[in-house]
């Protein structure tokens, strides 16, 4: 018999897994289930989840609009690091999990619940991301992960359980892919995508048109940044969530942000995923352009050395780890001079930088010019080169003497 639990807070999406989990928790733990659904900009009407959760057996459901907090406090800090997992993935799913888990713990405290639960499988990364946050914020919390306990280990068995218990599955059956969507991206896994040789079907995509079908005329935009964060689009001041939403629209219509990759999961296996991240792709390119004129060379290079480590921490679920927080402080300090504007063209899947300007620019045309100048003595370069080549000259001379 499972240890007695009186109340559990479930991260609830209303999909197949979490709909089944509500009923399964009640049956197996004889506990009260409180559901929590986060609006992270998934583009779905969440109000119907209220009725669905209650009908399935939940005593209550919290539905919270977290879009601004998500982009302002999670996406933008991560973007300041220019974080890319394995050089490709902009971490759209990874960065949402610590916020969802944080809110779950807050609700558990408010409700006096001893336990929290999620619908992540025992094969994936999300179980790690959720539970690392749970334990970081509430060390004594009880975690229930049904996928690691039950015998419903296939989609077919889950649908059979749902039908047996009167849980609606019509819309669920129609979705062949596992999808996760928020304001930063949408991801697709499963079905035909499990074969890495098979091309993702065009009808699968949601946020973007194919580059081939994008307009023949480029869209020109200008983004203004302050301390590394975008604050204005084409002169209009926008909130964090508004900024990302508008850039998603502009990028999507121009075929920007599609990525097809095979990534290394933290749990050890490789997984193929297809992602659409239109706005994030634009911001990544724009910030790099502004940094090129505002960041000191060695500061930029140091930050870039930290980027792979930072990305792994986010991907693996260590958002609330002290090392991530420490790196974040360094990154945020490095972004203080990243102020100014970037002009870009969006064209058939490409983000093309056409201009960058800043009052704090370190680019000095008097030094960089190919014309004659009075500030740089080119003869000084001879000594600079010889000093830097000295160790290599010594090495070669040593090889000659040892023959």
Image: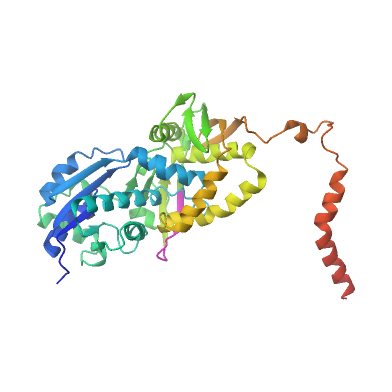
Q: Quadrant of residue 3?
A: bottom left
In the image, residue 22 lies at what x, y percent?
17, 55
Residue at horizontal 27 percent and vertical 50 percent from the top? 106
In the rendered image, residue 126 lying in the magenta stretch gets the answer: no
Residue at horizontal 40 percent and vertical 57 percent from the top? 317
Instruction: Relative to 37, say whether 143 is above or below.
Output: below
Residue at horizontal 47 percent and vertical 50 percent from the top? 89
Q: Which residue lies furthest to the top in this view?
A: 235
Quadrant of image for the C terminus: bottom right
Front in this rendered view, residue 326 or 343 = 326
Q: Residue furthest bottom?
A: 403
Quadrant of image for the N terminus: bottom left
In the image, residue 303 lies at what x, y percent?
58, 50
Does 89 sit left or right of 154 as displayed?
A: right
Instruction: Relative to 370, say whether 149 is above or below.
Output: below
In the image, residue 291 lies at what x, y percent?
60, 39
């Amino acid at each position: 018999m499972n240890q007695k639990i009186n109340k559990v807070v479930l991260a609830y999406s209303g999909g197949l897994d979490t709909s089944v989990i509500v009923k399964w928790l009640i049956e197996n733990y004889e506990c009260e289930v409180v559901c929590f659904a986060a609006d992270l900009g998934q583009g779905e009407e969440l109000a119907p989840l209220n009725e669905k959760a209650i009908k399935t057996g939940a005593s209550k459901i919290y539905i919270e609009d977290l879009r601004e907090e998500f982009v302002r406090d999670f996406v933008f800090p991560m973007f300041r690091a220019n974080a890319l997992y394995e050089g490709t993935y902009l971490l759209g799913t990874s960065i949402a999990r610590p916020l969802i888990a944080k809110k779950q713990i807050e609700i558990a405290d408010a409700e006096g619940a001893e336990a929290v639960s999620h619908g992540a499988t025992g094969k994936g990364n999300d179980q790690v991301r959720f539970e690392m946050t749970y334990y970081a914020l509430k060390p004594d919390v009880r975690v229930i992960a049904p996928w690691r306990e039950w015998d419903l280990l296939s989609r077919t068995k889950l649908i059979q359980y749902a039908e047996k218990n009167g849980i609606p599955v019509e819309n669920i059956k129609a979705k062949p892919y596992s999808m996760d969507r928020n304001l930063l991206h949408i991801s697709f896994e499963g079905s035909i995508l499990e074969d890495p040789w098979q091309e993702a079907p065009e009808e699968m995509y949601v946020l973007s048109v194919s580059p081939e079908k994008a307009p023949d005329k480029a869209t020109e935009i200008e983004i203004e940044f302050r301390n590394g964060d975008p604050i204005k689009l084409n002169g209009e001041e926008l909130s964090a969530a508004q900024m990302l939403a508008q850039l998603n629209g502009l990028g999507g219509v121009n075929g920007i942000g599609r990525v097809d990759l095979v990534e290394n999961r933290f749990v050890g296996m490789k997984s193929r995923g297809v992602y659409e991240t239109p706005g994030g792709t634009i911001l990544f390119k724009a910030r790099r352009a502004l940094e090129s004129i505002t960041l000191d060379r060695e500061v930029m290079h140091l930050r870039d050395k930290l980027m792979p480590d930072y990305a792994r921490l986010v991907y693996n679920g260590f958002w609330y780890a002290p090392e991530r927080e420490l790196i974040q402080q360094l990154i945020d300090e490095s972004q203080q001079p990243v102020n100014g504007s970037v002009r870009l063209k969006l064209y058939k899947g490409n983000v093309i930088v056409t201009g960058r300007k800043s009052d704090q620019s370190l680019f000095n045309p008097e030094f960089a010019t190919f014309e004659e100048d009075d500030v740089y003595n080119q003869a000084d370069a001879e000594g600079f080169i010889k000093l830097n080549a000295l160790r290599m000259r010594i090495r070669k001379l040593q090889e000659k003497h040892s023959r």
